[in-house]
Each structure stands twice: as C-alpha cells, then as structure tokens.
Amino acid sequence: MSAAEQPTSAVTPGAAALEVDDLEVTFHRRGRRLPVLKGVTLKIERGQAYGLVGESGCGKTTLAMAAMRYLASNGTLDNGRVLVDGQDVSTLSEEALRKWRGGKVAMVYQDPTQALSPAMRIGDQLAEVYHYHEGMNKKEALEQARESLRRVAIPDPDGTLRRYPFELSGGQQQRVVIAMALAVNPQLLILDEPTTGLDATVEAEILDLIEELRGRINAAILLITHNLGLVVRLCERVGVLYAGRLVEEGSAKEVFTDPRHPYTMGLLRCVPRFGMNKTDAALQTIPGTLPALGDPLEGCVYSARCPMAQPVCKRREPDFYAWPGDAAIRGQAEAEAMPPDPAAYSPHHAMPVGESSRHTRCYFTADVESMPHLTPVLATSLDERGGDTDVLDIDSMVRTFKDGSKKLTAVANVSLSLKKGETFGLVGESGSGKTTLAKCVTGLIPADSGTVTFEGGILKSTAGKRSQDALRAIQMVFQNPDSTLNPAWSTRQILTRAVRKLGGAKEGSVRAKVDKLSADVRVEPRFLFQRPTELSGGQKQRIAIARAFAGDPHLVICDEPASALDVSVQASILNLLVELQTKEQASYVFISHDLAVVRYISDRIGVMYLAELIEVGAAADVFDPPHHPYTEALLSSIPRLDFEKQRDRIPLRGSMPSLTDPPSGCRFHTRCHRSLGDICAQQVPPDMDAGNGHTYRCHIPPDELLALQQAGASEPEPAETL
Amino acid sequence: MPDDRPTPFGPDPDLREESMQLGADPEMIELRADAASEGRDLELPGGDHKSKALEADAAATAEQKRQRRYLVKALLRSPTFMVGLIIVLFWVFMALFSAFITQSPTLTDPNISLAAPSASHWFGTDDLGRDVFARTMAGARTVLIIAPLATLLALLWGGIIGLIAGFWRGITDEIIMRLIDVLLALPIIITSILILSLLGKGTAIIIVAIGALFTPVVSRTVRAAVIGEREREYVMAARLRGERSAFVMVREILPNITQPIIVEGTIRLGYAVFTAATLSFLGFGLAPPSPDWGLTISVERVFLQIAPWTVLFPAAALASLVVAVNLITDGLGRTFSK
Amino acid sequence: MLRLIGRRLLLMVPTLILASILIFLLAEVLPGNVGRSILGQYATPEDVAALNRELGADRPLVVRYVAWAGNFVTGDWGESPVQKVPVRPYVMAALWNSLILAGFALILIVPTSIVLGVFSGLRRDSALDRVITVSTLSMTVIPEFVSGVVLLYVFAVWLKWLPVTALAPEGAPFYERLYYLILPAIPLMFLELGYIARMARVGTVQVLSMPYIRTAVLKGVPRSRVVFGHVLRNAMVPTVTVIGSQVGWLIGGLVVVETLFSYPGIGKVMVESALNHDVPVLEASVLMVAVVYMFANLVADIVVALLNPRIRKGG
C-alpha cells in the first residue's frame, strides 16, 4: 500500500480536518473565464462544525465540490490548495481518490429524493460502501448496512434494506444518505443544504439526528446552507460567502450577534426574527442584486450594494483583516492613506489569517454596527387598514381528489373568515391542504361542498362562472416566479392585458394605469419591454404582484410568493406586499411554510394539519401558549437565529398519516405528545375558545393546556433587532 | 497546477446553480440587452401619435422579431442545420428547374439502353435508354410536393386535436386518446397500404393519407406540450382574469409550444419523405414513367447486377434528401434546447 | 406484477376489437363492392351480384362483421379467392417466416444499438460520440429499400460474399437459412439502430447528470461499478420502452425488405394481397400483424416493469 493509500481510519496528528488555502476556482464557458471562488482561505479543526452561508450562486457548492475534487468538467482549480486531514487532495492518485471519497470525506446532499439510485435496493446501496471501502463480502456488508440504518434510527431496518428509495419518505431517504456518509467513519462530513425542501418537522428530526451523531463520531462538519438558523443550531464557526469571496468569518455566535461586514449585517436584517411583526419593524433589504458570474468586479465585491461604501471601496479590494484590532485600525488607515490614483497604490499583501479567530473583508469594520436602516416601518395597525367589515367568509369547505381507487380529502370542512385590510396567514406542512384551499377560493378548482361568501354575495364555484367583477376583486400571486408570467409575452403586454380585462379602464387610461402599476411595484420602465426570461426572480414576482393589483382587488391570495427567492429579495417582496396593502386596503390570505415570515406579515394565523384547520387566532395568540399541540411542536422545530432562546424541541411521533386514510378522532392523535389517550383517538375534538377569537381543535381546555405548555418553555420574546 | 482533471462523470453540478443566477446564457443576455435598447428607441417617436394599444403591440412584435433574429443567428451557426439546409435547397432547386437544365426525364432512346455513365450521360441510362441524371434530378419533384403538404396537413389536424384534447382533458380527451391508441395499434405503413389499395393511387390521395396517418402522432406531441403548459401559473392567472378558453389556448399556450411543434414538424417531414418513397417503392404511389425515386428503384432493381447505376443514383439522391431533412431537425432541436 | 400483465391483456381486447373493425371497414366497405373489386370493371353486373351473394357481401354490414370476426376467432379464415388456397395456413406460414427474420434482426439490433448508445453517452460530445450518433441516425432515416439495394449491390453483386436471395434452398439446415437472412436483416437493423442507440445515449447522458450518480462517485465506488451498477440499470428503462415502441417500425420495415428480397413473409403477403384485392388474406394478415404488434408492446412493458421497481411494486 503506497503512502497515498493510507487506511481511512488513520488520522494525521496535528492536521486540521479541512484546510482551504487561497482557493481560486474558475468556470470556462465559450472562451469566457467566469471566476467562481477567489482567495478563499478557511480551516476546520477536527471535530469542529463550520457553517458556510451565502445566497444562491455565491459559490458554496463549488467549494464543497473542490474539496471533493469533483469540479464540473469546465471548472478549473487555478490557485490554492485543499487539504483534508493534512493531505493535499490534488495529489491523490485515481485509486487513492476513490478510497478517499466516502472514506475520509463524505457528503450529504440537498435533495434526498434524488441522491439515491432509484433502481437499486437501499441495502445494496449501503453495502456497496462497506464492500469497496472495507473489502467486506456481501453478507458482512449487508449486516453492517443494517447496523448503520439502526444508527440513524430508521424504523424497521431489516425491511428498509430490501426497499427501493421511492418507498421511503424524504426524511427517511435523508437518513439513509446520512447513514451512507457515516459508514466508513470519515474525518470530514460535508452537509450541502441537508434539510432544504424538507418539511419543518422533518427538518427538525434530521437536525436532531445530526446533532446526536456528532456526539458519537469524530468527523468535522462543513455545513453549507442559506438558512442562518441552521448554523446557529449546529455550528461553532461560520463563514459568510459573497460572490466567491469569504467576506466574514468567526465564531457563529460572535458573527451573528456582532457582525462586522455590511453583507452579514444585511443578511441578518432581512430575515424576519421569530415573533417579529410588520407593525413592529420593517425588514431591511439589500439593494441591487448579486453580481452575475463573470461580471467585472472592481474593488470590494460588495461595494455596489453596500450602504456604507466609500469611493475607496470601489478602487481596491480590502484584505481579509483580523478582528478586532487589525481590521478596524488597519482597514480604516489604509482607506485613508490610499492615494486618489489607484495605479499608484502598491497592494498590501499581508494575509492576516491564522492567529485571530475572526476576520472580515471590510475597511470600515467599526461602522458596521451603525449601518443605516433603509426601510421605514411600513405597516399601519389593522384598524387603520379597515379592519371591521367581513370580506371573505368560508363555510365548511370540502375538497376531495381521486387517488387511484381511493378518495383523498385535501380540504376537510374548513371554515374561516377574513376582514377588510387584514392578512390571514395560513401555515402547515406540505400536503396539509393550504394551496387547495386557496385554489377553491379563487375558483381555479371547484370545492365539493361549502360556500364562499365574498363581500356579502355567495361566489360561484369556478372562475369561469364568476362575473368579471368577482374575478377582479379576488386575485392571486403564485409561488414560482419562473412560470407565473407567460414567457411569450413582454412584461408590458402582460400588464396591459391584465389592466384591460380587470381594470375596467377606458382605452386611453390603460397605458397610464400600466405605468402606475409598474411604478408601484418599483419595476423600472425599461424592463417593461423585456420578456420574463430576461428578468430576475424578484422582478418577475413584482410584475406578478402588479398583475394581481391591476383591477384594485379586495382580496389577494399569496401562495408562498417569496419562498423561491433569496432572503434579501424575499424581504423586499414582503415589504412591497405590506406597502401595497397599507395603500390599497386589500385583504391577504398569505400561505407559507415559513413560520417566521407568516408571523411577520399576518394579523391572524390559521394552522392546517392533514386538511383540517386546527387552530385560528391573532398572530401573537397562535404563537404563544395555550396553543394546539401541533402548533407547539411545529414552532419548536424551527431553527432560530437567537442563541439564548433555543428551546427544547418537541419531537413528533411516527410520520405524517396518509390523507386517503386520516386517523380517527383527532387527526393529530397519532403523533401528539400531549395525547390524553382513548378520547383523542375516538372523538373528534371540539374547537376550544381561548379568547380574543382564538380557537384550537383539541380535547384539552385552554387553562390546562397553558399550564402544560408553560411548564415546558419560557415565553419567546420578539428578538431585539440589529 | 495540480492534476485537477475532472472526473468523467462531472455533470456540471455547480454550474447549474450559477447559471440559474445568470438567468440564461451570457450571449443571449448580451443580444437581448442590445435588443432592449433598440426597443426603447422604437417606443419614443411613436408615443404621441399611435393608439396606445397599437403601440404596445408594436413593441411586442419588435420583441418577437428580435427573438426570431436571435434564433436565426444561432441556426446559421449550426453546421448540421446548414449542411441539411443546403442539400434540401439543392433538391428544391432541382425540383423546380431541372427541366431547364437536363434533358427530359421521360425521353427514351432504345439504342443506348443500359449505357454506363459517360460524359454525355453522367449517370448512365436505364433500360429504356432514358438519362438517369435527368430522372434523378427530376425525381425530387414528387416527393417534395407530397412530403411537405402531408406534413402541413398533419400539423394542422394534429395541432387542433392536440390543443383541444390537452386543454379540455376530461371525457373529450379520453375519447380522442383512445381513438389515437387504436389508430396507432397498426404500423403506419400497413394502414397506408390498406387505405391506398382501396382508395386508389394519386398524389392528392397519398398526401391526404400520409397527413391523416401522421395526425395521431402530432396530436400526441401537441397534447403533451399543452398539458405541460396548462398547469403553469400564467395559465391560472389568465383564468383568474376571465379569459375565454379559445384565448388561453391560442394566445397564451400556443406561443409557448411552437418550438416542440416546429421540431415535431421537421421530424414528420423526414418521415413523410420516407413514407412517400416507401409507398411508391411498394407500388402504391405513382405509376411509370414518373421519375419518382422510390418507383425507379422498385422498377429498375432487376438490373442491379448488370446496370447498378440505374438504381444506385436515385438511391443516393433519396438518401441525401432524408438525411438532410433530419440534419435540419437535429440542428433545430439543438438550437431550441439551448 | 401479474395484475399488471392481466390488466394489460384485458386492455388489449377492446383495442383489438376496434382495430379489427377498422380493418374490416377499410378492407370491405371502402371499395364499395367486393365482387366488383375482385372481378374487375369488365365483369357483367350479374356475375358481380352472384359473387357477392356467394361471398355473403350483400348482407348488412354488422352481420358480416360479426360473421367474419366469429369465423376468425374459431379459426375459419376462409379461402383466398385469388390464390385459391385456405387462408390460415398460408398466412401463418408467412407469419412464421417473418418472425424468423424479425427475430434474427432483433438479435442483431438490441445489443449493437445499446452498446453503441451507451458508449457514446459515456463519451458524450467526443468526436467518437458525434461519429456514432450521426452515422447511426443517418442509417435509420434512410429508407430500408435504399440501404437494402446498396447492400445488395455491395455484398452480393460486387463482393459476392452473401447470396442475392433471402430464401435458402428447400431442406437447407437452419444455420444456412440464417446465412441467407443476413443481408435482409441488416437493413432492418439500420432501420432501428439510430433510434434505439439514441435513446440509450440520451438515457445514459441523463442518468449521468443525476445527483445519485454523484452520490455513487463520491461515496468511493469504482468507476466500473458506477457504470454497470448505477448508470446502466437506470438508463435501460427508457431504452427498452423505445425498443417496444419500435416494433411497429420493424414490421413496416419487414414489408419493404421482404418485397425487396422476395422473401415469403407476412409483409410480402400483405402487399400482394392489397395489390391483388385478395380481401380475406389481407384482413387476416393485417389482423395477425396487429396481434403480434400488441404482444410485442406488452412484452416490452413487462420488461420495463421488471427493470423499474416503481412500476413492478406499484402492481
């Protein structure tokens, strides 16, 4: 065995688990060089967990792939080194590389449903790892595979070995992928967005599993994510990546509580904190957009979007200064001393990484604390928005689908009402019936039974049967920015058509109305001549919002309008919706799986579980005890940005029951941690009244529930805003 | 520079992430940026005079023109497309003008029957002493009349049926698809033999027969494309705007499925050439003395051993045409899928 | 799995009934007058009427269809008015000959096209990939009588490696019959090669770009295992589906190749009976082809289901 093919269990003494040194990666496309990563230096000590955050396209995954020596065929590593456990990855022979992948470094991927070979049994896929890394025969390898499944707490490991991936739920598939990654006891475990796309409660289970496994394995972790809460939950250290540069690095707690780079600050400010509401504070946005790959970048990569940028920032890129001390003093000094002519400046090349534990790539580190807030509070109180008259009243709506020979109930007997100018947030995990409910209200699909009363009149079941006035008054904003606009039409055509059909405007005023709409949603007029494919996701969603507001609607249903967007864009879309509501006094039904977002934007909230609306009330009431045990569990599962207030998670038992065969009695009883026993399984619970219009469907009365739930956790306060 | 050779399996994983950020390929963006600035210029002078509606449409037409110009540019850069196009244009030219270039394809001369290729008869002569070169050039005519017209018929019928079946779904769709299944339960060449043996021969009948037989396949393609579009959110938005079904079908969905329809059309064109030639080879097409390639090969093949030129030249001509049509298809498909 | 086969078999019944109605209508109704179409335009009206009576062609349509279908199912396929022979042995012998030719062609087609397709998929965008793709596709789009004539000239007339005819002398052993079938089988192979190879290539390329292949590579599985264990297994599903759907083209190809090589198979019988207005033979042969075609599709579906656990387990 050559030196390069050392056994995977051997550990080089003193070496860090991962060391990335001045890494530069470039993609080549049609003769153009598109730099993806530049000057990235980071180090993960053995056993440490390191979070790498940044918005999509900033190069996070490329870094992971470089560490795996698995760059795309048009990507090259132009400079720098990647060392895993002291071993330079680029020097490995083919065979050593094979042993090293999966042996020393293992990876968990974003979409578990795509990460497993669909035509191969789970057992064979796991056994493969043992066979090729440990030389076990098939029987031994399968035995080990069973053990590994047990380790990741999969129910029925024996049965799972014989199953195919499609027979497992997403959460279970991710457990299998994790088991596979940990099979050979790697030194470094790379988690690439390991919970993105999973439901909140499943995400929490996976996070619990990772946390628990960390105690038992000695692998260091590189967590790649856009979700800052995940980093808070799992990592000691964090690096913030922007446009291929590491802009800030340090202990997770310090970076998130005392950020020293304007981009980090911007990211933290544009995510709604848990418990925050639009009437308390506005979400701050980051102006502009991420530079596209290959855009020329002069000076600091962030200077084009930075609210504190000075002329010097555009001239020369700051070094990665150590903080505190070095950065504040040297950065400022350099900025002041820099001659007006950049050509006369000789670059300063001291690379101060190493001793200090915090670094930031900014000249004006000391000023980040006082970075200006750009957005004022936009929302007025509900009373000022109208508030008193009922706009929408849904009474016992039922909608079923055929699933083969079975009947699938997607909306089961839901009733709710909505006042003028109010935002009703609808939360629930995927498959809970949120979108079906929305489609029934808009008439995209007819409900089986139940009535929808809108401004005093009963609505016809489908859009086709409704009057033009009714259509105009109820509009919808959809989830997917890429398909919400007709790609064959120009933006102006889209808005013109909407104004003509919905606005009821006279021919002459159509153009004025289109211009006003686009100004309202802050889309520059030049974009009106472009097609949707040429717009960014945020711009598309703005046009979609403008289209919905073409006829001055009274009710707009927003189905996850910002979940496909990056956080900074999400913030500006949410702000826009709040602003339009204040101006137009429209009511919203706002659907989202993101509890913090719903809490931020909603006046009242409804929680759906398995097609039923199990809890309704004012936003603050629903989020505080007493509330439905499901809501309680759901809230506890969200990874938060607050370091002090990490609460114990309430694990849910079992998995989500099927909609074709929902549990008897209380639908939640099979998973409930506060179950009372037989009564929950046998009797449909009543809607308990917790006062102030807050009701929840449970057998436990409010006072008892309050006592139970307060015993568990302290009340979360709205986080202080940065 | 260390050995950083990518693995052969590298599927550009991150590039996809990055290109989503890019929105589209960079050249496309540059071209479109140009186009957008043109658009602004175009809008200014007309602003006060034109009716507003007209103006919005004008801007949109300009946009469509730009889009088209971009596609044309991309196609002109595709070698497969260009080679195919040149060959097809050559045969179209010959179909139209060979009468002025060559001697008559039906002129017989018993004295020189089955003469080998020579300076006076480049491709030799056939059993009746007809010039094989003249016949080969003129042979393009029938197939170039039959195949495009049959294809257009199939696109028209299939397009309408596919749009309706895909958009309305439900019982209409169920019935149409069942019928199509039955029609496709027999190989096309056999159904066409059945039809032609009973309806008789003739160019018009062949065109209608091939058009009708290709209709089910086209309507399947169109239906699949419509189904892919109709669940998209912009269609829902149109319904919430109170648009009529016909408007949604024709104005909203149709413009977004033109590319699969065009590709399907060129595929069918290739098949139509293939089918028309095969039918005349089998004796269900035209009658002698037509210089049609399939017919000529069928009639002259008894001379393959003593006068192979009578068969091989029309065979090569036919092969060049079908390959050319398919090269065009390939070029279009590649350009569209970029 | 058994339920899947059963359901597919049941679905074939209405399709076959509809197809038989279609065939019956096309063969008997469209020409208008059966007796006239057999006897030709110079026969006297009396003779035509007599023949129609004899054939039962003057009865109502539905009655005739039911009688015809009933006879067909019970094995009474009638007698050919042109060949003056019983239809069933005549058609079945031809069908058998065709099955031998088609089977031989399939044995050539499937491995060749899959190997070529997977190979060019693995070496995607290389020069070799382009060569394979363009040449196989060209072979496929060229009508089989064109490639057949050229091959016949090159290998039989010019090089004299292979016989000019497709039918071995009476009583020749089986391997010699196959030797005679090589030349007709190659145009059939060309006909299918491009599409199946293309599908195998596309399937391979697609699977290679799937995240689960990345998983396999990054868990340290050797390359050969990735290709044979992960890529092939998943790429075969669309390929086999296409092989099934291409059987129709193979039958179309048989019609032409049998005519070109004067091989007494069902395709040649069909063409001749169509040209000679031999209605009972035409009906029987077309219907048999439809039956074979549907069974071939069924077999392909079963193989696909065997390869794809989702269908297999879904029942």
Image (spheres, coloured by chain):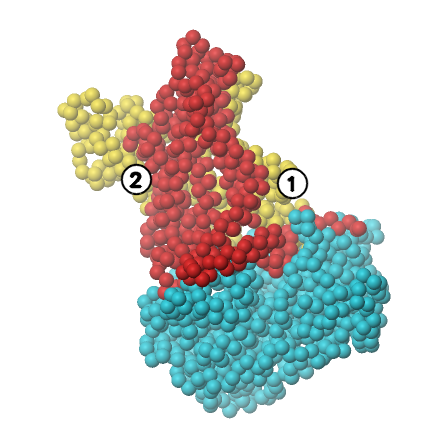
Chain colours: A cyan, B red, C yellow
Pointer 1 chain: C
Which element is circle 1 on? Answer: loop
Residue at 48% from the left image edge and 79% from the top image edge: A583
C71 versus B258 height, above or below: above
Q: Nearer the viewer, mark 1 or mark 2?
A: 1
Q: Quadrant of the C terminus of chain C?
A: bottom left
* Alpha carbon separation for disc pair 1 and 2: 48 Å
A143 versus A571 height, above or below: above
The answer to whether one can see residue A429 in this image is no
Pointer 2 chain: C
Measured as percent of width and height from the top left, residue A174 is found at 61, 64
Measured as percent of width and height from the top left, residue C266 is found at 39, 29
Disc 2 target residue: C22
Residue at 39% from the left image edge and 58% from the top image edge: B248
Residue nearest the observer in this picture, A326 or A632: A326
Residue kind at label 1, given as amino acid type: Ser
Residue nearest the observer in this picture, A17 or A465: A465
Task: Kindly indicate whether the residues beneath marks 1 and 2 are on one polypeptide chain.
Answer: yes
C30 to the left or right of A263: left
Discs 1, 2 touching: Cβ within 8 Å:
no
Disc 1 target residue: C126
Residue at 60% from the left image edge and 43% from the top image edge: C121
